[in-house]
Image (cartoon, grey):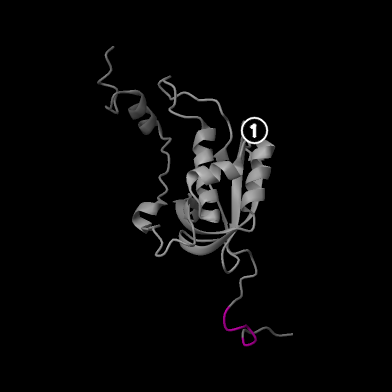
């Protein structure tokens, strides 16, 4: 038996799933809305999953559903709850999918009383609908860029108003330094040798 590369195809075919890259895409179709939870604290959140015109897989960021207003690191209350931020994203999707205004979108959604009902209602309104979507990216430690939906607009908007700039729309990875020198600098007011401590 002998092996050679003469029978290899011209170009290797990728048989895995194709994911969307950061950028702007017309005809982005909502394929599902899912209720998930964080692995650590089991905090519920919703994601909207999409498919591009060539089947590329995309998704929204995590849309947390808590109606409680949290606190900042300094103890002051945050300006809004996670739900208020997420509801704005859902509203944007409905407006884009139906090419309607805020009041019409609010009326379509109505009012629900549980996390599962939020997901079910959002899915009923959006699955199968098509929008123009802007995907931003976040670079991981391995150098790969993980895209998520940043903004959406109606396909009826011509020309589109979404803008993409790789220098602003891809968040670069910044490793956290855990060296003793960095930790010492963090707990003092700046001098690495601790000479600036008041005691």
The C terminus: image quadrant = top left
User: Which residue is disc 1 drawn over?
Assistant: 42
Residue 62 seen in the figure: no
Instruction: Please tell me whether mark 1 sits on a helix, a strand or a loop.
Output: loop
Provide residue 162's location: percent of width, then percent of height. Answer: 40, 57
Percent of width and height locating residue 197:
28, 17
Residue 153 in the image: x percent, y percent?
A: 47, 55
Residue farthest top in this picture: 199
172 shown above or below 164: above
Q: Toward the viewer: 64 or 152?
A: 152
| Quadrant position of residue 55 | bottom right
Classed neighbour count for the residue bearing mark 1: other residues with Cα under 10 Å, few (<14), some (14–19), many (≥20): few
Q: Residue at x 68, y 44 (%)?
A: 120
In the image, taking residue 186 as reference, residue 146 lies left or right, namely: right
State whether residue 149 is above or below residue 182.
below
Quick check: can you spot residue 104? yes
Image position, residue 3 (x, y; %): 67, 83
- Lateral position of residue 127 relative to residue 103, left or right: right
Q: Main secondary structure of the magenta part?
A: loop
User: Which residue extends farthest right?
Assistant: 1
Q: Nearer the viewer, residue 71 or 157?
A: 157
Disc tally is 1
Which residue is drawn at the image coordinates 42% and 48% (left, top)? 173
Q: In the figure, is residue 45 to the left or right of 84? A: right
Query: Can residue 10 be found in the magenta stretch?
Result: yes
Tell whether position 194 is magenta. Answer: no
Q: In the picture, which quadrant includes the N terminus? A: bottom right
Q: Residue drawn at (59%, 49%), measured in percent from left and top?
A: 48
Q: Which residues are magenta?
A: 6-11
């Amino acid at each position: 038996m002998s092996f050679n590369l003469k029978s290899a195809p011209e170009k290797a075919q990728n048989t895995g799933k194709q994911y969307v890259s950061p950028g702007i895409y017309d005809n982005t179709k909502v394929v599902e809305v899912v209720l998930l939870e964080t692995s650590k604290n089991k905090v519920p959140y919703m994601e909207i999953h999409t498919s591009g015109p060539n089947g590329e897989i995309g998704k929204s960021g995590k849309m947390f559903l808590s109606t409680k207003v949290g606190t900042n690191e300094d103890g002051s209350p945050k300006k809004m709850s996670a739900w208020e931020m997420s509801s704005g994203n859902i509203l944007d999707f409905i407006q884009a999918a139906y090419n309607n205004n805020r009041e019409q979108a609010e009326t379509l959604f109505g009012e629900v009383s549980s996390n599962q009902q939020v997901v079910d209602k959002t899915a009923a309104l959006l699955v199968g609908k098509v929008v123009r979507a802007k995907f931003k990216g976040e670079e991981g430690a391995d150098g790969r860029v993980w895209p998520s939906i940043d903004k959406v607009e109606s396909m009826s908007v011509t020309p589109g108003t979404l803008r993409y700039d790789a220098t602003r729309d891809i968040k670069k990875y910044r490793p956290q330094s855990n060296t003793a020198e960095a930790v010492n600098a963090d707990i003092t007011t700046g001098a690495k040798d601790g000479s600036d401590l008041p005691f």
